Amino acid sequence: MTRDDVMSLALCFDAPMQSWGIRSRGIIRDTMPEPTKSGVVGLLAAALGIDRNDDMALAVIAGLRLAVRVDREGVMERDYHVTQNVPTTQGTGHRTVVSERYYLADALFLVVLEGGERILTRVAEAVERPHWRLSFGRKAYVPARPLLSPGEGPVARSAEDVLKEYGWLETSPRTRAWMKGQTERPGLRTVVECPPGVAGTEVRHDQPLSFAESNRRFAPRAVWTGEVPLTDGMIPAGETLCS
């Protein structure tokens, strides 16, 4: 696929709570401040009905390029989970384990997938009629509104172009009106997947290779963190997109 053939699909990730862990092992379950590649691919796999042991099907959706725009930064919160009767390492008794689990409250993201038209069309159809229930990092963290705006699908634009042009997803009319009246506005933070070795990039170990229960594997990928301006044309006057 050449850059002239590139297509992009814009999705809205909006929920009261989201969790995008990248080092979630043991009793500390972290979250990144925006969706991870492994989390997004897992959601797409659920929508498409891909079995966790089907590494070939997983590789197809994991090959999509991911770009994220943060339309509302979430507040990082923490809750505690208590698990009783956990066997001790010696196997001689049981204990109670308290784990700390972090999540984002009231976060809002524009998630852009870049790739071929055929796979993006499949993804668009799947998120509208998912095979399994969709969630943002934990089963209880379900979307607050549709991921895809009515009538929308893949467009012949790069992910970077979509980040710069797609309408702001903020739902509050008061917030939109206030921002519309500002002459100086903060930019919207972006995290964009890019080739390795580019100066200023960050390496994240969240490229999924397998979701198999006994063989979960991930590879590194490079991302570039930047921002795009919130222009007048991006602030909707009426109903917001994806509503």
Image (cartoon, rainbow, N blue to C red):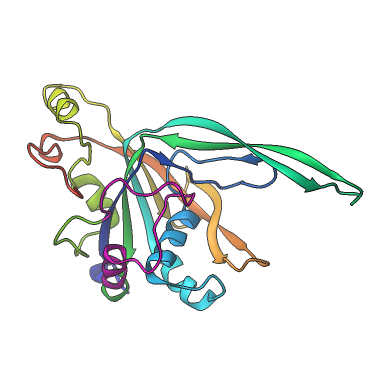
Q: Provide residue 18's location: percent of width, then percent of height.
A: 43, 42
Q: Residue at position x 49%, y 49% from top?
A: 138
Q: Provide residue 47's location: percent of width, then percent of height.
A: 37, 66
Camera-side residue: 117 or 97?
97
Camera-side residue: 188 or 52?
52
Q: Quadrant of residue 82?
A: top right
Is residue 21 positioned above or below 216 on the image? above
Secondary structure mostly seen in magenta is loop
The residue stretch that appears in magenta = 121-147
Query: How many dots with numbers?
Result: 0
Is residue 7 positioned above or below 177 on the image? below
Question: Is residue 141 on the magenta stretch?
Answer: yes
The answer to whether residue 47 shows anywhere in this view is yes
Q: Provide residue 197's location: percent of width, then percent of height.
A: 51, 53
Question: Is residue 140 on the magenta stretch?
Answer: yes
Q: Residue at position x 86%, y 49% from top?
A: 89
